[in-house]
Amino acid sequence: MHQIEPFSNWLTYYDSSHDERSPFFGKEYNYDLYSETVYGYYIDPAWDSFGSETLYLKTLYADYDEGFVVLEFIGEWNDTLYNDIMTLKRDFLELLMRDGINKFILIGENIFNFHGSDDLYYEEWFEDVEDGWIAAISFPDFIQEEFRKYKIDCYINMGGTLQINQWRTLHPLKFYELVKQLIQRRLN
């Protein structure tokens, strides 16, 4: 698991440790020290902790003028035991929303498991974005099935055309425009 790194090709366009609005502003990464774990396995030091015991993220890109953020995740999304959605929303997403972010692109290729609970925090997040949206990109099929089982798909757009396997080949603004167009088609 330590070999799974967050996507780094967009670092020339955005680095959360250099973004004064980012919760990770000023963070110094020690790429020689592996300290965070999922399932007892070390993960790459480039992943960021937002307070969950089993889920980590990386802010790949944020654009406050356009009001969007791209977040990549790794680990187990566990709402049953750890209420990860509450921690994510209260300790991370609300900070971004205060700075005008209302469109969220979540990349979930490295989500290994999902344990659902109720959908209250998803509903609250959905209501908080008002004119924005939440899109889950490239989540594994079995995770999407679990999201549907817990009715999370009522709040997060996922599946179908949002399984964008070539997202890494796109410039972050082109990626955002593509997701935005796909979401607008769904809403119309």
Image (spheres, rainbow, N blue to C red):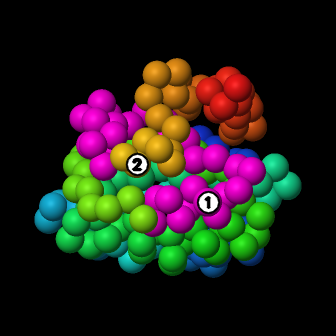
Question: Of residues 177 and 22, which is closer to you in this image?
Answer: 177
Q: Return the residue nearer the eye: 28 or 91.
A: 91
Residue placed under numbered mark 2 in the picture: 152
Side (left or right) of 155 relative to 119 = right
Magenta stretch: residue 95 in it?
A: no
Question: Where residue 110 sits in the image (x, y, percent)?
Answer: 34, 44
Residue 21's spot in the image, x, y percent? Answer: 72, 73
**Point 23% across, 49% down: residue:** 113
The kind of residue on which mark 1 rests is Glu
| Element class at badge 2 | helix
Work out whether 84 lies above or below 76: below
Can residue 104 be seen here? The reply is yes
Q: Is residue 143 magenta?
A: yes
Look at the image and give the residue range highlighted in magenta.
Answer: 121-150
Instruction: Name the residue type under label 2.
Output: Ile
**Count of marks, rendered view:** 2
What is the spatial separation of the Cα atoms under label 1 and label 2, in whole angstroms? 13 Å
- Depth check: 183 or 30 in front? 183
Return the mark for residue 127. 1
Residue 75: give x, y in percent of width and height: 29, 55
| Residue at (55, 31) in percent of width and height | 168
Taking the spot 42% from the left edge, 74% from the top edge, the residue there is 87
For the question of whether residue 34 can be seen, the reply is: no
In the depicted structure, whether residue 183 falls above or below residue 117: above
